[in-house]
Image (spheres, grey):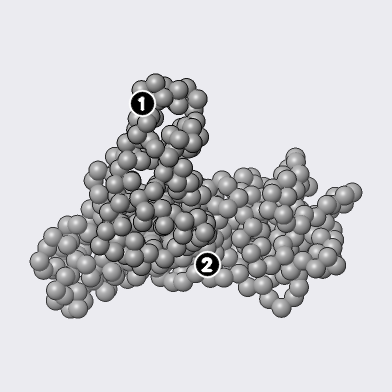
Amino acid sequence: MFESLSEKLENIFKKLKGRGILDEESVNAALKEIRIALLEADVNFKVVRSFIEDVRGKAIGREVLESITPGQQVVKIVHDQLVELMGGANTNIKFGGRIPAVLMLVGLQGCGKTTTAVKLARLLSREKRIYLVSADVYRPAAMEQLAVLGKQINAGVFDAGNLKDPVEICAAAVERAKRDGYEVVIIDTAGRLHIDDLLMDELKKIKNRVNPAEIIYVTDAMTGQDAVNVGSKFNELIGIDGVIITKMDGDARGGAALSLQAVVGKPIKFVGVGEKIDALEVFHPERMASRILGMGDILSLVEKAQATVDEKMARQLEQKIRKNEFTLEDFRNQLMQIKKMGSLKDVLGMIPGLNKIKALKDVDLDDKELIRNAAIIDSMTPKERINYLIIDGRRRKRIALGSGTSVQDVNRLLKNYADVKKMMKKFTQKGGIKSLRRNFPF
């Protein structure tokens, strides 16, 4: 999402780092460019003005101008201000003392409330029993959609039966959840194309009836500053406790994420980073600021790896690497592990410094390539997977035909595998495995 902004900021800081000494004029020139970059990223103009003045006050101080590396010091100041702008630290959901705790999701139609409700349920189900309820009696098949998605994560889903009033549905759902021992009820409320009195009146009635522990505003990152304006209105009329931004993996400019906390005054708690049910992440301002400034996000990368990597398989793989027995079957398994972690672009974006490698900037990272490669390996015989050197021209044609790919695709996969195998062999020399495990303890 922040690719364009990151690139512009990187170019600005490159100029600053190239200077031996920074004077007030050069800092002001850089801040002018940063202001333009933020405005082009659709950040609220009042937020930009305040942000620039805060940075200016710290960047034109004696500490920076006399610093050994003044350019890097300015980068740190901008990083710290970005963190503060987005809330300072991640904020957890407050469930309160009542059981079940009720979480009420609100937002306009089309922002992704229903899928977000299921994603949130999946995330919270690691520690609590979750019950889902749809209060959307207007959108066709809204309740059916929630029921189907809820079954995929084995969450409880309330069946409204003959009930038609959203307020009564929510009240009945909370009572049912209490009887059945659920700890959290997530209410997927109805949305509209825009805020109107009927919508707000309904939400107020639901709020008064079920007394939610938190009201969470769900918004689509693609709507830009509209997300901020609508969020302010929701907060003014019914009060919200936090925000979930969906579609953060899209091509939007990202201004909403940088403006919401400052304008609405409520923390961003989660971000949606894909369409799949597991594509919801806790929002960490510091990590997001690091990614915006091209510093990577190694902590999130490690957390993703820990959540997806099979430890038993990892230990077996380590033994195979030590014995130089890394086969195409192992290669396939590793590709699938990477696929579970998310899109290649996102994963690589979390690795510090990788965005600065020129050769990688022009590479088209196609996630379908992982699936294609798995299909190619699946079309091989067990002997071919163990010893790729026996795969001659005739076998390559057969594999390509069986996997629905071309011979060129098969050749590329085998070359990539051979390169990885060589790299793995290096890890077995001079303590490479130990070094790898120290840096990536998963």
Which one is in front, 22 or 142? 142
Q: Residue at x 80, y 68 (%)?
A: 181
Q: In the structure shown, which secondary structural element does the residue marked by tag 2 occupy? A: loop
Look at 83% across and 52% down and name the residue there. 159
The residue at the far right in this view is 162
Q: Is residue 362 visible?
A: yes
Graded by Cα atoms within 10 Å as few (under 14), some (14 to 19) or many (20 or more), the crowding at tag 1 reads few
| Tag 2: amino acid | Pro
Q: Nearer the viewer, residue 112 or 427?
A: 427
Which quadrant is the C terminus positioned in?
A: bottom left
Q: Is residue 39 left or right of residue 193?
A: left
Within 10 Å of disc 2 (Cα), the crowding (few <14, some 14-19, many 20+) is: many
Assign a secondary structure to mark 1: loop
Residue 193 position, x and y percent, is: 64, 45
Residue at the disc numbered 1: 392
At which x and y percent is residue 107? Answer: 63, 54
- Residue named by callout 2: 267
Q: Is residue 88 above or below residue 419?
A: below
Reply above or below: 422 against 177: above
Q: Are marks 1 and 2 in contact (CB under 8 Å)?
A: no
Q: Nearer the viewer, mark 1 or mark 2?
A: 1
Instruction: Name which residue type carries label 1.
Output: Asp
Label 1 vs 2, first from the N-terminus? 2
Vertical relation: 418 (above or below) 288: above
The foreground one among 404 and 394 is: 394
- In-image side of 156 versus 326 (left or right): right
